[in-house]
Image: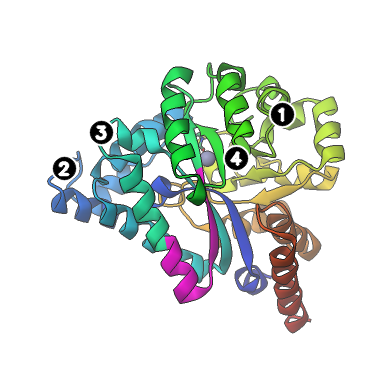
Amino acid sequence: MIELIKSLPKAELHLHIEGTLEPKLMLELAQRNSVEIPYTNIEDIQKAYEFTNLQSFLDIYYAGASVLLKEEDFYSLTWEYILKCVDNNIIHTEIFFDPQTHTKRGVSFYTALTGIKEALNDAKKEFGITSNIIVCFLRHLDQEECFKTLDEAIEYKRDIIGVGLDSSELGNPPSKFKELFNKARKEGFKIVAHAGEEADVSYIQEALDILKVQRVDHGVQAMHSKALMQRLKEEQIPLTVCPNSNIELKVFENYKKHNIKELLDFGLNVTVNSDDPAYFKGYLNQNYINIYENLKLSKEDIVKLVKNSFNSAFIDKALKKEYLYRVDEVLKSFE
Ligand code: HPA
Ligand SMILES: [Zn+2]
């Protein structure tokens, strides 16, 4: 089964590119760019990756991103992730990036976007990997500030498929960004938002009703409302669940307590993703393997999760069909 998990082509729909910064590249970029970081070696960095909740992770994650200054840094970051995609059989990826993490340090939206985009273009040329870029707003900031970021996203709309909402969830509900997302929708962006990672079901309801999201990022708290579960099932709203992240950030005590199998069995459109794999002990395959080993997932469960990833991607029907065909071909070869 593990061989099958590794061999199946997959789409990844919840991946923060800044969260793929491996300790080795962090040290190299810190040196190259003369940025001071509180670590001198890889072991120091790994020791710092012990989190108690989302905020304890975000503090370290934003500090790590401070080494990214130039276009080529964003290129290196993204290219390293693409090599992981090759390893993990990810043939389509939808990448979040947080412009405000960089613009507040004097690194322009254009610099970050160009480095990421160039690497994604090369990924298509070299490996045939397709991708989309989603700009995320930092929800701990004011809506007013986010409007500036949205205006930049509009300027580079050709390269950006959608907008999302991330960072500190508790105390920053989706309703805080109603007007921002109204404008983004009018501009034709696809809409997603992190909701129900740590915060209660009302955040998921607001994401659906006020921001009008097409996918919910995380969403694992939905299980606390039967009515919401029913709605998510009826409307087949995709949830981009990130098992390793949920364990590392103590959303669930351990893998055996994770609820992804319950969500799946209830009939929700669940997908598996790696969120910030350099910080959460593993890329996409490891997320699948961890839930497979701890939650008694069947082969049918794994296939459903993989097919959901393509069905929930922001790609056209023809490409979806081609990718699902590729999944079936691999399944046949395992019979
Ligand atoms: O899991 C996350 N939640 C919120 N913000 C984030 N930014 C990176 N990862 C996350
Ligand atoms: Zn996330």
| Label at residue 208 | 1
Q: Secondary structure at mark 3?
A: loop
Distance between the Cα atoms at labels 2 and 4?
A: 35 Å
Mark 4 and mark 1 lie on one chain; the one further toward the N terminus is 4
Classify 210 as above or below 36: above
Mark 4 belongs to which amino acid?
Phe
- Residue 314's x, y, as percent? 65, 52
Q: Which residue is mark 4?
A: 189
Considering depth in this image, is 225 or 281 the residue closer to the camera? 225
Within the image, what quadrant is residue 328 found in?
A: bottom right
Distance between the Cα atoms at labels 4 and 3?
A: 26 Å
Q: Secondary structure at mark 2?
A: loop
Camera-side mark, 2 or 4: 4
At 67% from the left and 72% from the top, the residue drawn is: 4
Q: Are circles 3 and 2 on residues that touch, CB within 8 Å?
A: no
Residue 133 lies in the magenta stretch: yes
Mark 2 belongs to which amino acid?
Val
Q: Which residue is mark 3?
A: 105
Camera-side mark, 1 or 2: 1
Considering depth in this image, is 206 or 45 the residue closer to the camera? 206
Mark 2 and mark 4 lie on one chain; the one further toward the N terminus is 2
Q: Are circles 1 and 2 on residues that touch, CB within 8 Å?
A: no
Camera-side mark, 4 or 1: 4
Q: Residues within 10 Å of mark 3 (few under 14, many from 20)?
A: few
